[in-house]
Amino acid sequence: MTPMVDLFSLLLIFFVLTASFRPTEAKMVTTPSSVSEKQAPDKNIMTIYIDSAGQVFFNIDNGKDSTTHFREDILKQMGERYKITFTPKEITTFGNLSSFGMPLKDLKAWINAKDSKEKEKLQTGIPTDSIDNQLGYWIYYSRITNPAAEVALKGDGNANYMVVKKVMDLLQENKVNKFNLVTNMQKEEVKLSDLPK
Amino acid sequence: MAEIAQEEHGKKGGKRKAKKHSTSIDMTPMVDLMCLLITFFMLTTAFAKAKVMVITMPEKNKDQKEEKQPEISAFRTMNILLTGDDKVYYYIGIADPKKPPLPALVKTDFSKDGIRKVLLGKNKDLFTKIAEYRDLRLTGKLIVADTTADNEIKRMKKEDKEGPIVLIKADDKAKYKDIVNIIDEMAICNIASYVVVDMSPVEKTMLTTAPK
């Protein structure tokens, strides 16, 4: 028994120390693969998810330490812009949540939703069309609140390129020209001998 | 529980029987708890951090449109057109409706003998240079820091005057994975200069008559 307990304690300590929790994602996204070995930064990152149906979801973190509350600040500004008042409790709750994708009028319901099933139902994608360009404002206020944030695009391989392009254009309007495309790593090597003659 | 009951019994019986207590404790609940915790942590931990491919897009500067663009030689320009279904079309040179004939589209795909072969053929010099440099490092003949090596490769790419200048264009039928695949091919083939741009109307008409 004792060796087993020893082993378990070791494993447990290992997992506790190395744990970095998987953020909950709005929709399952299957990323395409590439040879890139660069790691995504884990703080100060704005992530835009695009699923295979072309729906867009958004996520931004709270910054490097616990003194900054970027999410809360962004939500306040979004609320002001769209004349929706969020209670302080809702703002704090939103600060601790992760990726979301719905028109701003549904955001209140999403924050207050009790269980994850209810939350999932509300994830219908952020409007990106030119009449009601909410994603543009999310990006704009995120850029203003945290200019240091890098942008990661996590698109589904089967998403239409036009949707991705629209998102990229929106980002470029907000002076983001460098994108981190999230991919699966897949080794691929070409040797000198493979060169065509 | 059984042990505690025994103890009480012993107390009642007086001090005569100074019973030797066992030093071992029941560890089963602790093990149960640890099993649960380990399972929990194993399932929630994200081990592999996401990998990213960095791409820099040309800045959209509307004011400077009139400024003269640097001339690039037509035979170095390679246009890759993506239109979904894993189809890749490419042509060399510039498609200008004012200066017919239009260049012919060549159809290929994302396989090893497809677009990669074409790109490698075009980029032979630079690719050989970089591959030889990497080999030197791998075999230990040249010992330099990673950053130095990266800078050296960057310098080689910058000085390259022979390799193709690739313009990647996708139409509305293209999927996101096509773009990622083609940029990935650029990285594999060590292409020095490539850019993702919009497709021109001429190219769209060219695609309609392209070999299926």
Image (cartoon, rainbow, N blue to C red):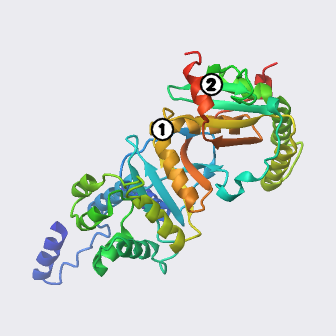
Asked if residue B64 is positioned above or below residue B74 in the image, the reply reads below
Which label number is shown at residue A149?
none
Q: Secondary structure at mark 1?
A: loop
Q: Along the horizontal axis of the image, is A169 left or right of B138?
A: left
Callout 2 amino acid: Tyr
In the rendered image, which quarter is residue B171 located in? top right
Q: Residue furthest bottom?
A: B15
Instruction: Report the side of A9 relative to A42 (left or right).
Output: left
Check the residue under mark 2 and report the chain it is in. Answer: B
Which residue is labeled 2 in the image?
Answer: B89
Residue B18 quadrant:
bottom left
The image quadrant that residue B34 belongs to is bottom left
Q: Indicate left or right for B102 with A33 as reference.
A: right
In the picture shown, does residue B18 fall above or below B109? Answer: below
Left or right: A185 with respect to B192?
A: left
Disc 1 residue type?
A: Gly
Q: Residues under labels 1 and 2: Cα distance?
A: 20 Å
Residue at 89 percent across and 45 percent down: it is B142
Find out whether the residues at labels 1 and 2 contact each other: C-beta distance under 8 Å: no
Q: Is residue B125 above or below residue B196?
A: above
Q: Residue B41 location in percent, x, y?
A: 39, 57
**Residue farthest to the front, as pictured:** B98
Instruction: Give residue B91's position: percent from left, percent from top.
Output: 70, 25
Q: List the residue tagged with mark 1.
A: A157
Of labels 1 and 2, the one closer to you: 2
Q: Tag 2, which secondary structure?
A: strand
The answer to whether any part of residue B15 appears in the image is yes
Quadrant housing the C terminus of chain B? top right
Of residue B66 and residue A113, the one placed in the foreground of this image is B66
